[in-house]
Amino acid sequence: MRRGVWLWTAALAVYAFLYLPLLIVIAYSFNDSRLNAEWVGFTWRWYGVLFHDEDMLAAAGNSLLIATVSSLMATLLGTMAGIAMHRYRIKTLTFIVMAPVAMPEILLGVSLLLFFIQLLNLTLGTLSIMLAHITFSIGFVAIVVRTSLAGLDESLFEAARDCGASPWETFRHITFPLILPAVAAGGLMAFTLSIDDFVITFFTAGVGVSTLPLHIYSMIKIAVTPEVNAVSTLLMLLTLTLIVLAAKFAPDALKGKG
Amino acid sequence: MAQLEIRNVTRRFGDFVAVDDISLGIEAGEFFTLLGPSGCGKTTILRMIAGFDLPDAGQILLDGKDLAGTPPEQRPVRTVFQNYALFPHMTVAQNIAFPLRMARIPQNEIHQRTGETLEHMRLTDKAEHYPRELSGGQQQRVALGRALVSRPRVLLLDEPLAALDAKLREEMQLELINLQRDVGITFIFVTHAQGEALALSHRIAVLRSGRIEQVDEPSRIYGFPRSRFVADFIGNINMLDAAVLETAHGHSRLAISGLGEITAPPVSGLTAGARGAFAIRPEQVRIGTRSEVTELKNHFPGEVRNLLYSGDVTVYKVQLVGGQMLEALLPNSAPGRAELFEVGDAVRVGWRHDAGVFLHE
C-alpha cells in the first residue's frame, strides 16, 4: 500500500515536470493581459493578433512549405534506403543512413552550413533548409520502413514472383502496399521533425528566411509575449496531431500487417 | 522423355553440399514426392525448379527446354508454400486472381476463371474474406487455388500439410489426391513425413544428405527398401544382423547372428559371405502359440517384453533367444474382446520364407 502511494507520487511528479510548463503556455495564451504574470481573464485576442502578424504568417508559411517538401523527399529516399538496408544487409549502408540520426544536431548544423557555403556555393535560404531537413529525416523514415519489412514473411515476395510478377510488379502490388503504413508513419515523423527543428535550421537558414521556430526565438529575445504563447499552442496542437496519426499507423507497420 | 528432367544437379552453400549430383526424371501427370529428413536437399531441389535458387552445376529441363535463364515469374511452374504465403492485404478472390492479373488476362476472363477456381476449391462464400479470417484448411485451399488458377505445367508443394492438425491433414491428403486426378497437372511434393509420401505419391524419391537413396513406387519403397536408411526411414522395421549363407533360385539362406538360419527372398547380385542386415516389417512377423507359427518356415522362441495396445492393433516387443528384440504387429480383427499376450509370456514368433529383405552393407 505504502509503495503504491510512493509510486503514484513519483509518477505524478514526473508528469507534472513534463507537462506543467506546456499547460502554463497554453493557459497564458488565453490570458487577457500583456504580461505573463497573473491571470486576468479569458480571451481569444492573442490568436487574432497572431493571424494579423505578417512576419509570423510568412514564417509559418515557410515552415509548412519546408516541412511538406522535405518530408516528401525524405519519405521517398528513406523508403528506398530502408528497402536497401533490408535487402542487402550491408553494415556500412546502415551506418551511413543512420549516422545523422545519432549525430549531435549542432554538429550536423555546422557541417551542413560549411558544406552548403564552401562546397556547393549555395545561397542560404529555403532550399538549404529543405536539404538539411531531408538529410536528418531520411534515417528516421528508413528505420521505420526497415522494421516493417523485417516483420514481413520473405516467402510473400517469392510467392509473388511465383505467380508471375516481375520484381517491379512484386514491389508495386505486394511490397509497397504492405509497407505503406510504415511509409506514412515515417513521412509524418519527418514532417514533425522538420516543422519544429531549431538548431539545424538556425545554421542553414541564412538571412532573410525564417521558419516558425526561428521566428519565435527572435520574438522571445525581447519578451515572452502572449502571442508567442498562442503560436506555441498551435504548434503543439499540430505536432500532437501528427504524432497521434503516426502512432495510429506505426503499431501495425511494426507488426508487419497490412 | 520425361516432362521434367533434373540432370546432374549440384548445389552448394559454402562447404555444405545441399544437392549432390542428382538426376531425376518426372513424368507428365505424375504425383512425385521428394522425401527425406530435414537438410536432405529436398526443398533446395524444389526451389531450383521454381527458380528461386540456381544449380551450381547441372541442368533442369522442362519439356526439353533448359530453365537456367528463365526467371521464376516466367516458368510455367507454381509453388504452394509451406506457410501458404497468401497476400495478407488481398481478399481470397484477389489472391486467386493475382496470377491472372500478372499474366495480363482480360478482366472478364479473370473474373470467370477466379469464380471457377473459387467454386472448385469450395471457397465461393469466402471470396471477400481476408486470409487471416480463414482456418488453416481454408488457407491451404486458397494457396492451391492461387497456384492452379493459371494452369501451370507443374505444381510444386513444399510441405503444405505440415501446419495442419492430424485429422485435417488426413482430409487434405484425400483432397490432394482427388485434385491431382482432376487437374492432371504434375505434382512435385516435398515432405519429411513418410506416411504422407506413401499415401499420396505415384513415385517417391528418398533423399539423404543431398543424394537419392531410392526412387520407386510407394509399395516398393515400403516393401523392398534398398538400403538400411530407406528401410529405417519409412515405417517401422526390424533389423537383424545377418550374412548370406547360400543363394539359390527363388530363395536364399541367411545366418542371423546369435539366432540361427533362416530362409529369405532371393538376394540378387550377392554371393555367400556377404554381410548386412535382414529387415522385416512388424506386420509380417507372426506371434502366437506353438502350432500356428511353427507352420512357417522361419520361427523362433521368445518372450514378450512389452506391449502397446492401440485398439486396432497391438504391437509386441519380443526378446528372441539370441537377445535381439523383434517387433510384431497383431491386428485385433477377431470378433469380441481382443486376446492379448502378457508381458513375460513365452511365445513363438515366425515369418514366411518370402517375407523381409536382405540389405547389403
Image: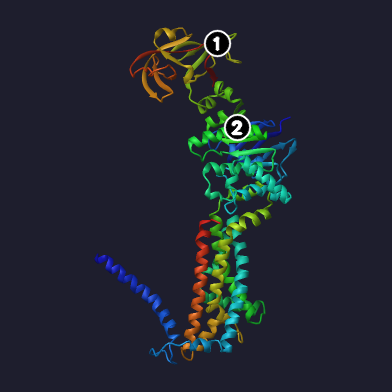
Horizontal and vertical percent position of residue B357: 54, 18
Pick whichever, A258 or B346, lies toward us: A258
Give the quarter of the image for residue A200: bottom right
Q: Chain of mark 2?
A: B
Mark 2 = which residue? B177
Residue at the spot 55% in from the left edge and 43% down from the top edge: B138
Give the quarter of the image for residue B2: top right
Marks 2/1: CA–CA distance: 39 Å
Question: Which element type, helix, strand or loop, lies under badge 1?
Answer: strand
Residue at the spot 70% in from the left edge and 33% down from the top edge: B5
Q: Residues within 10 Å of mark 2 (few under 14, many from 20)?
A: some
Task: Give the vertical position of A248 relative to B79 (above or below).
Answer: below
Residue at the spot 53% in from the left edge and 63% down from the top edge: A249
Pick whichever, A185 or B207, lies toward us: A185
Horizontal relation, residue A190 to residue A4: left or right: right
Horizontal and vertical percent position of residue B33: 60, 32
Residue at the spot 68% in from the left edge and 54% down from the top edge: A169
User: Both on one chain, marks 2 and 1?
Assistant: yes
Question: Which element type, helix, strand or loop, lies under badge 2?
Answer: helix
Task: Give the vertical position of B222 relative to B136 (above or below).
Answer: above
Instruction: Please name which of the two marks, 2 or 1, marks the residue nearer to the observer.
Output: 2
Task: Using the image, tell me which numbered label, if any, was put on residue B252.
Answer: 1
Horizontal and vertical percent position of residue B25: 68, 31
Horizontal relation, residue A2 to residue B4: left or right: left
* Residue type indicated by callout 1: Ser
* Residue type indicated by callout 2: Ile
